[in-house]
Amino acid sequence: MDDLPLLLAGPGDVVAVMPHVIGARPDGSVVVFPIDPQRPVARADIPATSEKYGDVAQGLAKSFDRFAGGQVLVLAFTDQLERATSVCDAVAAALEPATSVVDRIAAQGDSWLRLGDTRPEAVNQGSITQADRDRVAVAFIGRGHRQPYDSLSQLRASFDPVEEDLSAAVTASAEQMDLVGVWAPAAAFEQRWMTHTIEGFVARPAPLSADDAARLIGDVQNVPRRDHALGLMTHQESGAHAALWKDLLTRSPEDARTPVANLAAFGAWLHGDGMGARLALERVTDPTNSLASLLDTAIDRGVDPAGWTPPVIEPLDGQERPGGPAERHDSRREPPSREGPDRKGPPR
């Protein structure tokens, strides 16, 4: 949560930013919101029965094991006051004394209420105006964030497969990539195509054509090329990378989804979108995949993505990568075609 685009003046502002931080209106959620932006935001569904509040509280507290000593707000998004009070109390008890809970807030719609607060000087309840929401939305959209979904179920549904059958094209692409991998010049050529295609989307986001989508999905079935796509991600551009791989995830055949889901999850995590990362990981079809397990652990433990440093990418052909950082999105660069102008050797 280290890139909030505006200062928060009180509980009302925190409630107003929550849909943008999570990606959807968090109705039915309990959220731990840190005052220190270097700490993670943690969210869970409010259980249907109070007997399970303790388990949820322990799970949320686990996310802050590495961040003891900070201050947080606990917010319950429900119109049932007794439920909000009980779940906030349970979460606060699990967090303290290692983490200081400075406020407990119930929120529903445009209204919020400070729970258990008797300070006469404090504003103990309030409403969020449309002007407040517009101010927050402008700040987040100006940073490249999309409008939040109306509900968490809508956000989850946005990861559902679309009605586009790329199975045959992805299989053919992956098989061709297996042949390419044994010949270094051809593998280097494909790596350059990947770089251009991914960076082209980052510069000018638009869904890839069916042919390019299938080719890129087929590429990342190969671990070195999947890792090449990971290495292209930076903190600044991670949101665009997450959007690219989320789109490709919804277009991927089931048996090809795992590496694409990992890339979507990694981009979301790097962007500070833990919810998006978790939803992408739900689409992993290989339960033994080590990268998916690693990402799940990082998200579960609240590992700060600020520690990620993109690796230095060394092209397979040993040539210097064209264009430095300042020329990264130079529109004059032509993408390598599938055949290549002077390509010799086995066809793809």
Image (spheres, rainbow, N blue to C red):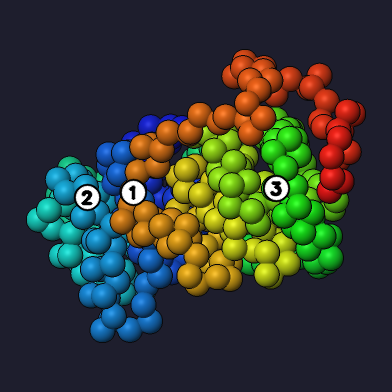
Q: Is residue 324 above or below residue 97?
A: above
Q: Element at badge 1?
A: loop
Q: Is residue 192 above or below residue 259?
A: above
The x and y percentages for residue 203 are 70, 30
Q: Earlier in the sequence, mark 2 or mark 1?
A: 2
Q: Badge 1 is on which residue?
A: 303
The x and y percentages for residue 135 are 52, 36
Q: Earlier in the sequence, mark 3 or mark 2?
A: 2
Q: Element at badge 2?
A: helix
Q: Residues within 10 Å of mark 3 (few under 14, many from 20)?
A: few
119 lies left or right of 264? left
Of circles 1 and 3, the one toward us is 3
* Image quarter of residue 17: top left
The dot on residue 210 is none
Residue 111 makes an appearance in the image:
no
Q: Badge 2 is on which residue?
A: 66
162 lies left or right of 25? right
Residue appearing at x 61%, y 42% in the figure: 229
- The Cα–Cα distance between marks 2 and 1, rounded to whole angstroms, is 8 Å
Q: Badge 3 is on which residue?
A: 182
